Image: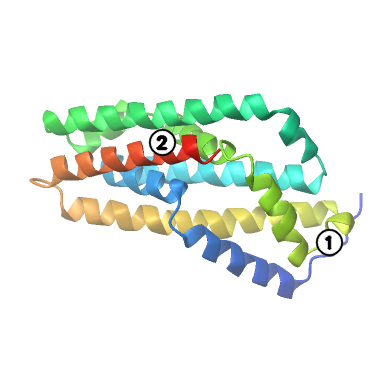
Amino acid sequence: MDLMFSLSWIDALALTGAMAVLAAVPSTSVMAVVARAASSGFGHGAAMALGVVAGDIVFIAIALVGLAVLIEWLGPVFVVIRIAAAVYLVVLAVQLWRSASRAASRSELARGGTALGSFSSGLMITLADQKAVFFYLGFLPAFVSLEQVTTPDAVALMVIALVAVGGVKLIYVAVADRVSQRLSGGGTGLIQRLAAVVLVLAAVVVVVRG
């Protein structure tokens, strides 16, 4: 196994910065993790953010091994994933809206879901956008030659995605969680309704962007 890196430290730092900036841009995943964290707490928001990153890592792996052509062949599969992601987000939105009506607390909402469910929804949100693999095919060559990528390079790229994308999403999660805590009490129902609306909007984006 080749243990040499073709990715330089400078390129690695530049790639980390670029991915962090792109991850900070408001998007469907940002909307979803913010709504999840605000309504159910940091743990669920972090789990969803990890799922988003996992989806990015899957697409990076596909781009690196040159299997992007499979994306076109698997088109119907991604349609199913897109629909499933949208449905799950709508289900979460309905649960939040109903909980707001009966004044359920964030701790009750957190107990009502699972970290795996939050992770899975984040993963589906990313995988629902199969065009992302083509983005990576065009984006990564600016920092590393895909024809010369070694196994250590591939691992490094995935770690960079975890740190850059995951770190930014966690900042969003932490801020949303903190704001929600400060507005807890009389504002809990309003937060839950706003989160429900955001999740529905995210579901619409997931469906129409395909």
Residue labelled with disc 2: 203
Callout 2, which amino acid?
Ala
Q: Where on the picture, by quarter, is residue 192?
A: top left
- Label 2 or label 1, whichever comes before in sequence order: 1
Report crowding for label 2: few under 14, some 14 to 19, many 20 or more residues within 10 A (C-alpha). many
- Number of numbered discs on residues: 2
Along the line of sight, which residue is nearer the eye, 127 or 116? 127
Mark 2 vs mark 1: in front: 2
CA gap between label 2 and label 1 equals 35 Å
Give residue 181's position: percent from left, percent from top: 21, 51
The answer to whether residue 122 shows anywhere in this view is no
Q: Where on the picture, by quarter, is residue 90?
A: top left
Give residue 208's position: percent from left, percent from top: 48, 37
Asked if residue 203 is positioned above or below residue 6 in the image, the reply reads above
- Residue at 66% in and 71% down: 13
- Residue at 32% in and 44% down: 35
- Residue at 35% in and 41% down: 201
SS of the residue at dot 2?
helix
Give residue 62's position: percent from left, percent from top: 74, 42
Residue labelled with disc 1: 145
